[in-house]
Amino acid sequence: MSKPKSSVDHSAAAAVKRPAEQDLQFLYLVLDDWENGYSVRKLDVDAFQLQPDDHHEPEPFTEPPLARFDVVHGYSHSIVAHGTKIVAMKPHESSPGIPAFDTATSAVDILPWPEFHMDFGLPLVVSMAGKLFLFVYSSYYLGDPPPPPPVDYPPPEKKPWAWTTIKSPVPFNFNCVLGYAVHPDGRTLFVSADKFTSSTEKGTFSFDADRLEWTRQGDWLLPFSGQAHYVAELDAWVGLCRHKGGTGHLCSSDVVPLDAGRRTTLPRWRILGGHRLFNRESPVHLGARLVYMGGTRFCVVETMWHKNDGEARRKAKETVGYVAPPRVVICITSFAVEHDEGGELRQKSYLLARHRKVFKRAHHICDISDGAPIAFWI
């Protein structure tokens, strides 16, 4: 009997072509390893060396951070990417505005406060169509800052840079978002949410960034957990699977056509073949995030307890309340998604093992998010 082929391609890593110098992008991690806030770290995924197995001791960060955000701990979900900027949407009340670190220039900008100073639970913040959208009890967006006024005398009155309130009400509770994806048109957002108090809040909704209007698409729900990404080469959305039996795996979904009206059923979707990327039921698992790297390339960033912190982990299980891990291990697995010979999508790994880093948490504050790490490809 012939030996079955492995689902892992050991040689594909060498076949991955590194982008030209001017097109280089990097993985940026935002870590709570600073007592006053968060640190920004940069990793070159293409330069990773294969690590043979998970028993390999994770490497500490040796380089100083690129930048630090002096912001409130426990709100990591409010740190988002917008263009080349990393924006920390939950600064201290005394802050003059919202800090944004520009990865292209290393400059730090100050964005204006929304009218309510970000006093909320789990907001949905999305960058699309050149604007930064904030969906809470109402919807808001922040466009580009106004251009500098011409050099005249007397100088004209300078227009303030401010968030714009959107009249169309948010049709779901922002704390109950299950998954979301931006349509390939670049201006339409699809969001699936669970019920909070009313059955009308459960379903899938779309938001048009040009018309600034919400539309209910149907009672069905996207299969993704968190953000899914459109892959043009596959003409599909790809994200982490939310359904039982598929957690830790990728899944893909057909893109919802915009001119087909309301749907009664969710689009065709499937769990992708390949090994499971993480085990959510593992006692050391903390959270995971899917990062899109362009083309058909992705990486999953998983955070875990350190294997030698078993005593602290046992205390966490036995204690009523939150016990923070003293150290956090970061596992990064990169892979590609492609069509197989039968035309079905499958996951193709080109890193057999995960690259692993570790850092010490600088505080014991509970994070109200789902524990997913903060990671961006910029």
Image (tube, rainbow, N blue to C red):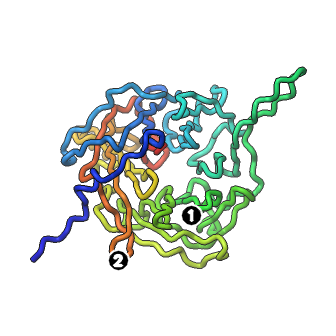
Q: Observer-nearest residue: 50 or 193?
A: 50
Residue under numbered circle 1: 192
Kind of residue at badge 1? Ser
356 versus 167 height, above or below:
above
Q: Position of residue 127 (x, y in %)?
A: 60, 48
Quarter holding residue 99: top right
Kind of residue at badge 2? Gly
Q: Observer-nearest residue: 247 or 156?
A: 156
Q: At numbered mark 2, what does the secondary structure look like: helix, strand or loop?
A: loop
Badge 2: residue crowd in 10 Å (few <14, some 14–19, many ≥20): few
Farthest residue, direction left: 1
Quarter holding residue 117: top right
Residue drawn at (39%, 29%) of the image: 362
| Nearest to N terminus: mark 1 or mark 2 | 1
> Which quadrant holds the N terminus?
bottom left
Q: Observer-nearest residue: 346 or 295?
A: 295
Residue drawn at (72%, 57%) of the image: 210
Residue drawn at (46%, 59%) of the image: 225
- Callout count: 2
- Callout 1–callout 2 Cβ contact below 8 Å: no
Farthest residue, direction right: 154
Q: Nearer the viewer, mark 1 or mark 2?
A: 2
- Visible residue check, residue 9: yes
Q: At numbered mark 1, what does the secondary structure look like: helix, strand or loop?
A: strand
Residue under numbered circle 2: 342
314 versus 280 height, above or below:
above
Is residue 99 rendered to the left or right of residue 247?
A: right
Q: Position of residue 372 (x, y in %)?
A: 43, 48
292 versus 366 height, above or below:
below
